[in-house]
Amino acid sequence: MARRVVVALLGPVAWAPPGTDPVEWRAALAEDVVDLLATLNEVETAVAVTAADRPLADAVIWPDTAVYEVPEATPNAVFAALGGAGYDQAAVIAGDAPDVPGLTIGKLLRPLTTRPVAVAPVEGGAPGLLGVAARLPVPDWLPALDLDTARPAAVRAAAPRPGDLAVTPAWRRLRGPDDLAFLDPAVEGWETTRALLSGAARSH
């Protein structure tokens, strides 16, 4: 069976809701994503950060979570860091999607049985990706990716054949006020983000 890892990439967060501390907001999102990964079956989990963000990783990880320090907060840097770790497949997930279902992450990994790369777009057609998964070592054609700006069409254009890339179901990232409206209080998870938002609402 393939050895697989899902990595939360705790990159910069450019927006925070009014009334919330941006540092606390980023930490809440990261903690919820890390907690979600810990519930996944049949995969190992890890966190990736730049050296400057190592304190954030140390604050949110579980005791047995691996942390990879990368030179830049990109999926390509994470894949490179995993090079000697013995994994067959890896997925890199954005650190600002606290309510992403485990099933969505599973669907990102599933195509790797037949295709070298898969991407999950951001819901709503906005630029950026929820995550990217690849067989390791990654194919030479994989372009430099930024989770905030990359689009599936650009990744597909770089592939030798269109079928080399699978596009899996989209999910939202919390990058602006419109995204908050889609958070569903009935959905389990995202406890830390939920608590921070309710506290900010009470203080205003």
Image: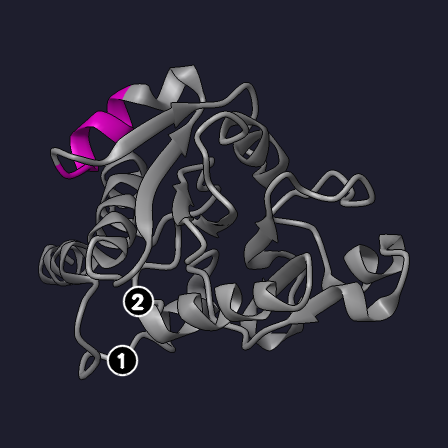
Q: Is residue 56 magenta?
A: yes
Q: Residue furthest top?
A: 51
C-alpha span from label 1 to label 2: 9 Å
Q: Which residue is mark 2?
A: 99
Q: Are dots 1 and 2 in contact, CB under 8 Å?
A: yes
Mark 1: which secondary structure?
loop
Q: Which residue is mark 1?
A: 184
Which is nearer the eye, 60 or 194? Answer: 60
The image quarter in which residue 69 lies: top left
* Secondary structure mainly formed by the magenta segment: helix
The color scheme shown is one colour
Q: Would you say residue 121 is visible in this rendering? A: no
Rendered residue at 88%/59% (across/down): 157
Q: Is residue 82 magenta?
A: no
| Image vertical order of residue 100 relative to residue 134, above or below | below
Q: Residue furthest bottom?
A: 186
Residue 87 picture location, percent across and down: 46, 41
Q: Of the numbered discs in the image, which one, if any, rests on residue 82? A: none
Question: Which label sits in the foreground, 1 or 2?
Answer: 2
Q: Earlier in the sequence, mark 1 or mark 2?
A: 2
What span is colored magenta in the figure? 55-62
The image quarter in which residue 99 lies: bottom left
